[in-house]
Amino acid sequence: MELYNLTDKKKYEVNIPSGTGEFYSTCPACSHNRKPINQKKRCFSWNRTKSIGHCYHCGNSFVEFKEREQLNTSTPKPLNPSTPKPINYINPKYLKLSLGLASNFGTFLKSIFDEEELKQILEDYQLGMTKDNSVIYWYIDKENRIRSGKIMQYNPKTGKRVKSGVSWVHSQLKKQGMISEDWKFTRCLFGEHLLTKYPNRNVFLVEGEKTAIICSIYFPDSIWLATGGSEMLSENVCHSLRGRKVLVIADSDKMIEWEEKIKDINHNLNLNLKPYEKFNILLSKEQKEKGWDLADYFLNG
Ligand SMILES: [Zn+2]
């Protein structure tokens, strides 16, 4: 079949067997440019129902090629309609300057965990702090590049959040004129860089950064990642989970919603995410109603 690449406007010949559902293959646009070891990776997916394709490596979108007149009138909407924009990163010097556990959240962690456990937390999650003792959750991607840092404030005694709103490192740097106004934040999963650091570990995905960090101490043989919010579970941040076994633990008030999302994500990205429901059994009705997460369970249960 002749495919038209909506991104670079070129034509490519791709052999797509007839049938239904998603077809995965190597990408005609980028595979030959990749390292030899990655050239056979099936980064290209073709949706046979909608006749549109997308590459998760180079971000290009494809439709079936038709003559120009037809193309103009009947181009199907691509999976990812926007041309992929380059991702903006934060200079690592800001992370290095911020590292430490003197934040209020760090003080809370110190009241629960011993030195060896704290060392592991700091090393893995690269926790930072601000002048007013907020914690910085650095969002570092699989290529070890810094997407941004989420700044949050906690009560140092209870470890509960102080409802003063969330701020981001890139917003602060913009205010100070350290990065340009058009610098754009592209989300990744919190802890995503650990997928590279620990290539063979099973993966747990939870909602909150705090939950991921605390669970990583209780279950050190697994990687603990967080979406950073119940609305933040999306296809865009899940590409990095390709090829990994992932158990997803929703906060108790979001289980049904997340299960639906997981179904879509697995189908569209060919991933292996599984909702983990056993945790649900541990919680009482009252705890569920309060929207408890795993961290609440381990710290208060
Ligand atoms: Zn590609």
Image (cartoon, rainbow, N blue to C red):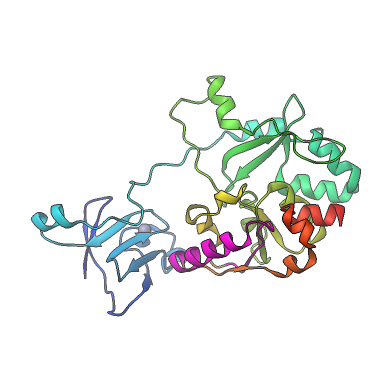
Residue 40 horizontal side relative to residue 101, left or right: left
Q: Quadrant of the N terminus?
A: bottom left
Across and down, in percent, residue 56 comes to 42, 58
Task: Tell me the residue at 77%/62% (across/down).
Answer: 285
Magenta span includes 140: no
Hey, which quadrant is residue 73 in on the image?
bottom left
Residue at 33% x, 54% y: name it. 60
Judge left or right: residue 229 versus residue 5.
Answer: right
Residue 267 in the magenta stretch? The answer is yes
Q: Who is closer to the viewer here, 161 or 133?
A: 161
The residue closer to the viewer here, 205 or 253, is 253
Q: Residue at x 52, y 53 (%)?
A: 237
Image coords of residue 49 (percent x, y): 30, 70
204 horizontally vs 184: left or right: right
Q: How many marks?
A: 0
Q: Is residue 147 visible?
A: yes
Residue 63 in picture, x, y percent from top left: 25, 61
Give the answer, above or below, for where 295 lies relative to 145.
below
Residue 101 seen in the figure: no
Above or below for 265 versus 177: below
Q: Which residues are magenta?
A: 244-269
Where does ligand 1 appear, by image quarter?
A: bottom left
Could you tell me residue 61's position as x and y percent?
A: 31, 56
Q: Name the image quarter holding the C terminus.
A: bottom right
Furthest toward the top, the residue is 176
Quarter of the image for residue 76 reads bottom left
Up the image or down, 202 lies above or below 238; here it is: below
Tell me what residue is drawn at x 69 percent, y 34 percent.
96
Relative to 234, is 78 on the left or the right? Answer: left
